[in-house]
Image (tube, rainbow, N blue to C red):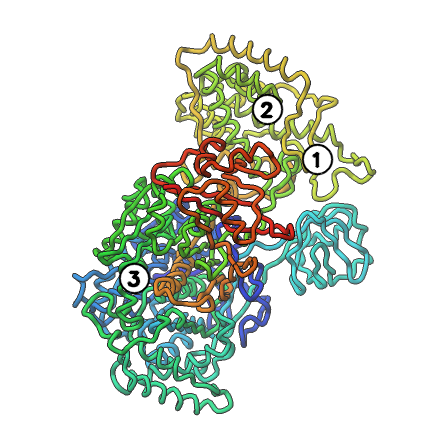
Amino acid sequence: MLPRKREGQGDVVEGETENNNNSNTIKYVSVTSPVKKHRISDTAAADSTVNDDTFAIRNSSGSSSVVEPAMAPGDSNHNDIDEDLHSRQLAVYGRETMRRLFASNVLVSGMQGLGAEIAKNLILAGVKSVTLHDEGVVELWDLSSNFVFSEDDVGKNRALASVQKLQELNNAVVISTLTTKLTKEQLSNFQAVVFTDISLEKAIEFNDYCHNHQPPISFIKSEVRGLFGTVFCDFGPEFTVFDVDGEEPHTGIIASISNDNPALVSCVDDERLEFQDGDLVVFSEVHGMTELNDGKPRKIKSARPYSFTLEEDTTAFGTYVKGGIVTQVKQPKMLNFKPLREALKEPGDFLLSDFAKFDRPLLLHIAFQALDKFISDFGRFPVAGSEEDAQKLASIAANINECLGEGKVEDINPKLLRQFAFGAKAVLNPMAAMFGGIVGQEVVKACSGKFHPLFQFFYFDSVESLPAEPLDPSDFKPLNSRYDAQISVFGSKLQKKLEDAKVFMVGSGALGCEFLKNLALMGVSCGSQGKLTITDDDVIEKSNLSRQFLFRDWNIGQAKSTVAASAAASINPRLKIEALQNRVGPETEGVFNDTFWEKLTVVINALDNVNARLYVDQRCLYFQKPLLESGTLGAKCNTQMVIPHLTENYGASRDPPEKQAPMCTVHSFPHNIDHCLTWARSEFEGLLEKTPAEVNAYLSNPVEYASSMKNAGDAQAKDNLERVLECLDREKCETFQDCITWARLRFEDYFVNRVKQLIFTFPEEAATSTGAPFWSAPKRFPHPLQFSAADTSHLNFIIAASILRAETFGISVPDWVKNPKMLSEAVDKVIVPDFQPREGVKIETDEKAASLSAASVDDAAVINELLLKLELCRNNLPSGFRMKPISFEKDDDTNYHMDLIAGLANMRARNYSIPEVDKLKAKFIAGRIIPAIATSTAMATGLVCLELYKVLDGAHKVEDYRNTFANLALPLFSMAEPVPPKVMKHRDMSWTVWDRWILKDNPTLRELIQWLKDKGLNAYSISYGSCLLFNSMFPRHKERLDKKVVDVAREIAKAELPPYRSHLDVVVACEDDDDNDIDIPQVSIYYG
């Protein structure tokens, strides 16, 4: 049950659908279950019930209430969401969830590493208030996992020592502290309470109070103990989830509906349907069978890729004629949580993360109870390396297990309990980061009803991260250093390897900030031999601040890598870090040269695009360096380990490319808002960036420009010249009234004249060459608009278009433009010529067409004529005249860019009867905004750093590594071993993509060929880059055989070999003695 209003506090409202998941940032890796399109089934949560009628929030008397959230103290505009700051988070949650968060007060008890991570994520998300509770003081031990503490804080109260740095993350969140013993009654001040360091006895007492409170208080208990972690959630006896997965409702375009019982509904094969049996759907825009347009949800069954059966008798309905959209209706779900007291005895189904550890959760359920009893009995944690303490813990666990009767564990696994006991006191940073992400997301769910909660226990371990070789008890002894907690788990030898690691991190955005924090706390690259190199060519923007937590508002405009490096060094002053602003790619191989790559221990990607990932992957393959890869998309995240000779590389498997709408669909036949926004962005760039840039290119060098256009002589050149001429002649603006005239005539051209021409060329009753209706699904028949100054959306289009047009011509904008009456008067002055559709106008209908410009035999003559006219216009321009091209910037709400794009898209949508969107949703789609939240980012980096322990230890097998896909919305965790690389074999040799054959001493082509022949390989073709150095089919190539390979590359391929490189790489095509092609590794020829 969601929280109701309490005195002086806010409440929540329901009903939101805003979300957008257009991105290729996340890469789905090979895992054991099909998770790419995973949806929760009705049985996803044990002991849960679904109540389809529950939409409102129930209070104790059974009545319902929906109230607007209250504003945060001291922040009168807290409910006015700062879209510049929270745009990426809004793309995940939508406005209503954000407003619910803004009204939520949260308690975080226990400010060791896990508590700090949870608090960070909630403060970045923007809850109303966070209260930090801790009665203890900072110890040197805490610096292994808590990023807000420094050595100067040792001895201070943990909660008090945390406030200042956490407050810097978001000044809109009220942060307060409690430093004395908590009472049950104090919990009534919060919508959600989180405990990270509490005894089971106290947890049960507090949970009983929260569960029985009216309204219930959401209770979360989480612990990380060494490489083991747990979460327990209880959101009350009746908790309503409004949106179980956060995905947009699925839709389909109808092709036919039968008059049957049950009715068969077929959809166009434009895109596969994502419906499942039992889904509820509504119909709209159906012609003929109009009875279905009543808005009533109907259940479907027999769902197939392009059809489904409707549980409805349509025999008496009208006959289907055409059209229709079918849309999934998302149902709320009610969960019945059990209190901790009951759940401990009857935990139900555990949420699994690793199917190779199917029986592990129940054992850990016992182990954490045993640890609580150990601490209660002895007043301390087990000592790391103490076999006696490990035995005591195992004995307690065995007793608990015996009390379970039939539900007991068969194998109590003493080895695992020993590992659990040894690390029980330690809070490790990667574990805190991972669980901080999970718990932070559960708090958001508790406060908003957005996404499916964790129901109810989750256990996780990463014992594979321990060193491969057994450790001596003396290795665990504390050294009185900030890494003592980590040493108590991994030993001092691995700690030394961490400190001496040479790490290259590519990117310092959201992932990069989290990684830097983790690495600094772990002590990576903090030793005398260590070095961390970070590079990012981007600068900090306001929208970064909601998740890139090392940045502050005063850093906006500064280089990301420099600021992030400085912030990381403040977390751990021993960090040896160098910040660069270079993009990693072929153009910077002089900076990131062979010597640089050869010295590296490991590479960590923190990138936001696939092409850069693929390049770094190729470099790591070449230099045989481990690559730790991760990505996020909203609540989803993935990690992939690329380990030399053990796993396949990142580029070995790729997601299919995103489907692109055909050009003719976007320009003439849109049927969804994405098509309209794609067209709007294209028009924006053409009108305001490309055309002014073309004008400037012409004016800067008319002779050269004219020559290049004549040489091109094609339809594209003609179009460019026509646009330049329009700008400098017919559509040239000298006053702001000219800009208004231009904007008004653009409106008429786009939304009236073009539509009139389209329906003149293809009337509503038009047929295709096969006799089928031309305007059949998915095409939508358009209608021209009628401009009205009384329509604010029409006027807003005129404002945005005229202001941006004025900017390109350097014309000042008068203040009266924002006065609707004066603007209307200015628009009324515009003379709009009548339009008559013309015969014979060619409108592209071929979906395979790549260009809308038709080539003509007259193009060359037209180009000459246009150039003559341009010359005349140029002579009439003032000296030095230039236009100002405008580059699209989505994250500035004052620049009118999104106003124009949203206006263009929505007017076009109105033409085609497509539902319009607000400016924020338009920004998500047109700006190609990648949905992003701090919780999934934190989790991804925690998982990667658990793998980093294995990489730096250096002795792990492929079965010890884990790739992960997770979706915190569901929640779903799917972990699996990485896929090994494909092995090629020839005779007694074998190799993989990781191998590179090396030939030294500057060989000739003949020596290279003989060297391969000695391996039973007959080389018939040798190439360098795209240039052929040798092919046995060409007799003249035999003249090159006694030349050095490097000399042939310089002579034939014009290879420019930089001085820092002492080798070149050639690709050799070979056959065996039976003429079978053999795919051999790249061959490196050393000449230096």
Query: What mark, if any, has residue 716 been given in the picture?
Result: 2
| Amino acid type for the residue under numbered disc 1 | Asp
Say few, some or many: other residues with alpha carbon within 10 Å of mark 2 (under 14 / 14 to 19 / 20 or more). Answer: some
Residues at marks 2 and 3, CA–CA distance in whole angstroms: 57 Å
Instruction: Pick whichever, 290 or 745, lies toward us.
Output: 745
Residue 32, image x, y percentages: 55, 66
- Judge left or right: residue 1026 versus residue 811: right
Q: Secondary structure at mark 3?
A: helix
The mark lying in front, picked from 2 and 3, is: 3
Task: First in sequence, mark 3 or 1: give its number.
Answer: 3
Residues tagged 3 and 1 counted as in contact (Cβ below 8 A): no
Instruction: Pick whichever, 235 or 290, lies toward us.
Output: 235
Residue 378, image x, y percentages: 26, 86
Residue 1055, image x, y percentages: 44, 34
Residues tagged 1 and 2 counted as in contact (Cβ below 8 A): no
Instruction: Pick whichever, 377 or 1031, lies toward us.
Output: 1031
Residue 219 showing in the rendered view: no
Residue 753, image x, y percentages: 65, 26
Task: First in sequence, mark 2 or 3: give its number.
Answer: 3
Say few, some or many: other residues with alpha carbon within 10 Å of mark 3 (under 14 / 14 to 19 / 20 or more). Answer: many
Say which residue appears at 55% left-offset and 22% top-offset.
720
| Amino acid type for the residue under numbered disc 3 | Leu
Instruction: Pick whichever, 255 or 985, lies toward us.
Output: 985
- Judge left or right: residue 523 versus residue 726: left
